[in-house]
Image (tube, rainbow, N blue to C red):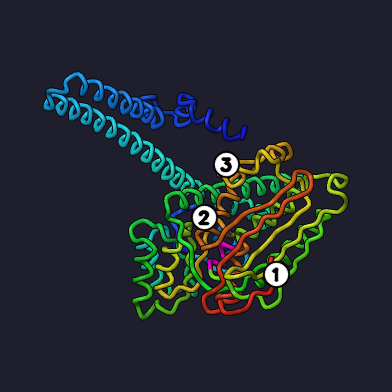
């Protein structure tokens, strides 16, 4: 109940709301709606009062009503214009990110390839100390590339230019290959990575490349966030379990970890772009906060859904579901939950 | 020695790829625009073409159209190496019969070398 009251109060803080958009008050939709609402109430009362005063002169009343309606119409026009301006600003921002990201991609690739040449020894043997700095350079370039690539994907999602392929593929094969790829990484961080699959899992319908990115992101997060928790906090060894099962018209995929979990207050923002949970920021300053936003967009655009359950200090389970491929829809479900 | 024609307008990329593949024994010829790329392909008949899409004078799609429409060059294996990564661009390239599409920023030089080796084999 307290939450609802707080929400209402925050909505009534018009100046605060308008500050968010960084536009003058006269262009702020919330403020204009407040003005419009007040004008409607005042004009309704005024019409009523004038109507009583001039009840013997209907033409006068009609004239006043027309005048007030015209005023309201003008106000609505201003509101619509302010929305248009906000939409245009948003479009320009998306386009700006798209252009900048594209332009940054080439010099970043140049740098990455040059570092690779320097590290390969083609141009002569490198000293251990140099090698160490090349490694740092390479890692940072990779970080920048990831960020640019995420910004580009985000701008495509916002501009609805994010096209996904639709094809039948095996979620089981995709997951198995990725888990095999991740096992040495997990092992090096002393984390046990397990996979369990329900029998006769049907094929799913979607873009295998993009779904792979989603699962990769979830596994990467799981391993990383276990690393942030001390062994005593998580009650023993780190563990990530990937589960696949079939229920109804969907194949479900769960990634469960016993990492640091997500604080309760942060949970509602977890799929928002640029959001990073407070306890994660304590351990790691890097990260764009775009990964889960992109994951959710990919899954939803594939006709699926994504969610999570988490308890701070105990771990998190992220899940997503993808529609069963049309040809295999008749396969009976193997597990009910 | 096997010859690779690399059509790419970015000089640093030209240098990096030529250096890396050259050190592995391939002979890399550079073309800094699409028109020059088509001319060199017709004159030298390389074993493989590495092609960017955004190019001056003739873009990658125009280059592909010319090369795949010419008897002399149509069977030369072509690898598209670009930073365009949208599904529409990939399908447009695939329509020309190109089988390998690599997004530059996702590739390390050794990945490109692997694809080159798979496509045309070892340098000699």
The rendered magenta stretch, by its main secondary structure, is classed as helix
Real-space CA distance between mark 2 and mark 1, rounded to the nearest whole angstrom? 36 Å
Q: Residue at x 59, y 77 (%)?
A: B121
Q: CA distance from mark 3 to mark 1?
A: 30 Å
The answer to which image quadrant residue A137 occupies is: top right
Residue bearing the label numbered 3: A274
Chain of the residue that carries numbered disc 1 in the rendered image = A
Which residue matches tag 2? B13
- Residue A121 seen in the figure: no
**Residue A215 belongs to the span the image colors magenta:** no
> Alpha-carbon distance for marks 2 and 3?
32 Å
Q: What residue did someone put label 1 on?
A: A176
Q: Are marks 2 and 3 on the same chain?
A: no
Viewer-proximal residue, B72 or A76? Answer: A76
Numbered disc in front, either 2 or 1: 1
Answer with mark 3 or mark 1, whichever residue precedes in sequence: 1
Q: Quadrant of residue B122?
A: bottom right
A312 vs A327: above or below: above
Q: Which numbered dot is residue A142? A: none
**What range of the chain is rendered magenta?**
A206-211
Disc 2 and disc 1 on one polypeptide chain: no
**Image x and y of residue A238, in percent:** 82, 53
């Amino acid at each position: 109940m307290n939450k609802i009251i707080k929400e209402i109060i925050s909505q009534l803080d018009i100046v605060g709301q308008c500050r968010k958009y960084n536009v003058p008050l006269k262009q702020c939709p919330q403020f204009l709606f407040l003005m419009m609402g007040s004008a409607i109430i005042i004009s309704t009362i005024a019409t009523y009062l004038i109507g009583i005063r001039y009840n013997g002169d209907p033409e006068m009343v009609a004239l006043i009503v027309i005048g007030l309606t015209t005023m309201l119409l003008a106000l609505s026009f201003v509101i619509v214009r302010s929305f248009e301006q906000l939409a245009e600003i948003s479009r320009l921002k998306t386009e700006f990110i798209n252009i900048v990201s594209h332009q940054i991609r080439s010099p970043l690739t140049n740098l990455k390839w040059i570092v690779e040449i320097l590290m390969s020894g083609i141009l002569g043997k490198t000293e251990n100390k140099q090698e160490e700095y090349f490694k740092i350079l390479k890692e940072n370039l990779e970080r920048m590339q990831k960020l640019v690539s995420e910004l580009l994907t985000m701008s495509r999602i916002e501009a609805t230019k994010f096209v996904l392929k639709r094809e039948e593929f095996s979620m089981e094969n995709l997951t198995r290959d990725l888990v095999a790829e991740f096992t040495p990484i997990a092992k090096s961080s002393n984390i046990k990575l397990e996979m369990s699959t329900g029998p006769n899992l049907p094929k799913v319908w979607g873009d295998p490349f993009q779904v792979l990115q989603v699962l990769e992101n979830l596994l990467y997060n799981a391993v990383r966030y276990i690393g942030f928790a001390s062994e005593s906090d998580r009650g023993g060894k780190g563990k990530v379990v990937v589960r696949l099962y079939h229920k109804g018209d969907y194949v479900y995929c769960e990634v469960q970890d016993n990492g640091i979990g997500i604080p309760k207050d942060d949970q509602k923002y977890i799929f928002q772009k640029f959001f990073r949970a407070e306890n994660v920021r304590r351990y790691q300053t890097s990260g764009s906060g775009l990964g889960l936003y992109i994951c959710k967009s990919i899954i939803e655009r594939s006709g699926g859904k994504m969610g999570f359950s988490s308890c701070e200090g105990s771990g998190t389970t992220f899940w997503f579901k993808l529609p069963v491929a049309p040809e295999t829809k008749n396969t009976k479900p193997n597990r009910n939950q | 020695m096997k010859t690779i024609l690399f059509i790419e307008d970015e000089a640093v990329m030209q240098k990096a790829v030529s250096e890396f593949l050259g050190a592995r024994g391939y002979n890399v010829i550079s073309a800094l625009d699409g028109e020059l790329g088509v001319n060199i392909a017709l004159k030298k008949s390389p074993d493989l073409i590495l092609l960017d899409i955004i190019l001056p004078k003739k873009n990658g799609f125009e280059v592909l159209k010319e090369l795949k429409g010419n008897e002399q060059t149509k069977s030369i294996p072509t690898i598209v190496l670009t930073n365009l990564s949208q599904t529409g661009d990939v399908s447009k390239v695939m329509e020309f019969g190109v089988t390998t599409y690599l997004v530059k920023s996702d590739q390390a030089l050794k990945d490109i070398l692997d694809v080159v080796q798979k496509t045309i084999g070892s340098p000699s």
